[in-house]
Image (cartoon, coloured by chain):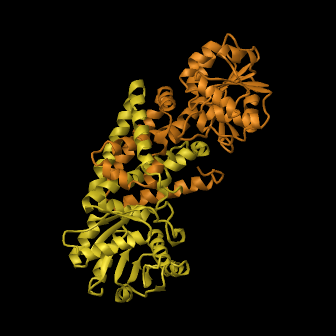
Chain colours: A orange, B yellow
Amino acid sequence: VNVGIVGLGLIGGSLGMALRAAGLATRVVGFDRSPADLALAQQRGAIDHQASSLADLAAEADLVVLATPVLAMQGILRELAPVLKPSAVVTDLASTKAAVTGWAAEVGVTFVGGHPMAGSEKSGMAAAGLNLLRGAVYIITASPGTPAEAIAQVERLARGVGARPLRMDAVDHDRAVAAVSHVPFLASTALVRTTTHDPAWDVWGEIAATGYRDVTRLASGDPAMYRDICLTNAAAIAPLLRGLARQLDEMADGLEDRPYLEGLFQDARERRDAWLQGHTSFRLP
Amino acid sequence: VNVGIVGLGLIGGSLGMALRAAGLATRVVGFDRSPADLALAQQRGAIDHQASSLADLAAEADLVVLATPVLAMQGILRELAPVLKPSAVVTDLASTKAAVTGWAAEVGVTFVGGHPMAGSEKSGMAAAGLNLLRGAVYIITASPGTPAEAIAQVERLARGVGARPLRMDAVDHDRAVAAVSHVPFLASTALVRTTTHDPAWDVWGEIAATGYRDVTRLASGDPAMYRDICLTNAAAIAPLLRGLARQLDEMADGLEDRPYLEGLFQDARERRDAWLQGHTSFRLP
């Protein structure tokens, strides 16, 4: 199959590098609105050649992978729909699935949602890597009417780049990633905001160390990507974010309550350690 | 000088290993209420020999380093005061400084506060390491009446283990570490609580990846240490924690506001990256 990748950033670029290295595609054609990123993608081996437009890419691709920030996918799907090969399957790599699934249905393309649970606080083609997706859970969402062969094709892609496909409902997916990815990003960002805007930050910044660095790591993520994530997943994120705020208020009330603090901290440690124990396959950053 | 270390956990053990390796002390004597940890400390080279009691340690030590959870220091200072050498200097390694400084003043020992900004989510002597303190900022707090030579002695200790001494007022210190260490720990813990107690955690835990792992890292820290930190630093932590909760509520209100989200995320990324840029000396975990 010929694979077309739209958007050669961190994830799209890494996918291209991995599937070319694995010999999974006859050819990989890429398109990006930034000519520099597109040229870099070819130079780094993420694509075989550069398409001059979405139509140019669609003329060739049997499998189209959308790897832009999620809101851009609505216009791209509209533009692609009339020019895709009739047998073409479209998939994506975005962090929210309900919105893009709806847009694909509106324009009538054969669509399978995809979301590899891998990333970095770095963004752009320059940060892409051959092994970024290796070992990652790769969530696949499909609608009741999605052809089984289209789903199988995306599962082969996931396995081919070394990831582990996991089928989920799009709405369940969006709530899950709100909890384990979007809210952590927002908490990380909120912490950076409240600390760095304090008049004492000059001193605080001098003594902040590895704990602060790690808890705030996600705040260095791509603003455009996270903006689109929030705009397409607000319904799932908002209640979880407010729940986290209530937990912080409850903690503030309990800061002098010894048994409460002990119970809280022991419970959190045990639960995180149990989770980590089950994920020994994580590569270190 | 003979150095006595009370409490052979992660930080006390690492300090002992580093100062013995650097040849800073004539002898290092250790005491811990856990005979197993004390024996391990000797085996791992953190101390030269084991004291059988605080009095036994005090009889020998010119510089006493308290490295227990902070609340235990009140009783230890009371017990040490009558048995210390008249010339002895006491310092500590705790994460809050105002409370312990007050207790030391109450019992009339010569005291210099110390707080190396280094650590790990792991705890105990088994996790101690020769280089844990290397390169870390080592905050030193003193009262107006503290003898200059006592301060100089603790500064030599800090430099000797490869850390960078930084003088601060105890109250300023407590607010600073509330912001860059205690509140991040509590946010990390709150995130673990709100996610792992959700009925959907079985699925969420499957897809949580490196972002979740890093933002929650601090939640695996020593519950007893953090309990004591909260109990002795509630006044500084509470308003910062409530401020963070307000920021999260504000974000929840703004999840569909594109310019707001862009401004927020760009600002946080720029500020964190600027901070990180100034801290290129961090060792990776």
Residue A228 visible in the current orientation? yes
Quarter of the image with the N terminus of chain A in it: top right
The location of residue A58, given as percent across then percent down, is 70, 16
**Taking A198 as reference, is A23 above or below it?**
above
Judge from the rendering whether residue A220 lies leftward or rightward of residue B230; answer left or right. Answer: right
Residue furthest to the left: B145
Judge from the rendering whether residue B166 lies leftward or rightward of residue A239; answer left or right. Answer: left
Report the label total.
0
Quadrant location of residue B153?
bottom left
The location of residue B69, given as percent across then percent down, is 38, 69
A138 or B46: nearer the viewer: B46
Quadrant location of residue B57?
bottom left
The location of residue B85, given as percent across then percent down, is 29, 87
Residue B257 visible in the current orientation? no
At horizontal 42% and vertical 81% (from top left) the residue drawn is B25
Residue furthest to the top: A82
**Taking A252 as reference, is A30 above or below it?**
above
The location of residue A272, given as percent across then percent down, is 53, 54
B269 or A281: nearer the viewer: B269
**Taking A207 as reference, is B152 above or below it?**
below
**Taking A219 as reference, is A205 above or below it?**
below
Quadrant location of residue B253?
top left
At horizontal 72% and vertical 21% (from top left) the residue drawn is A89
At horizontal 34% and vertical 46% (from top left) the residue drawn is A195
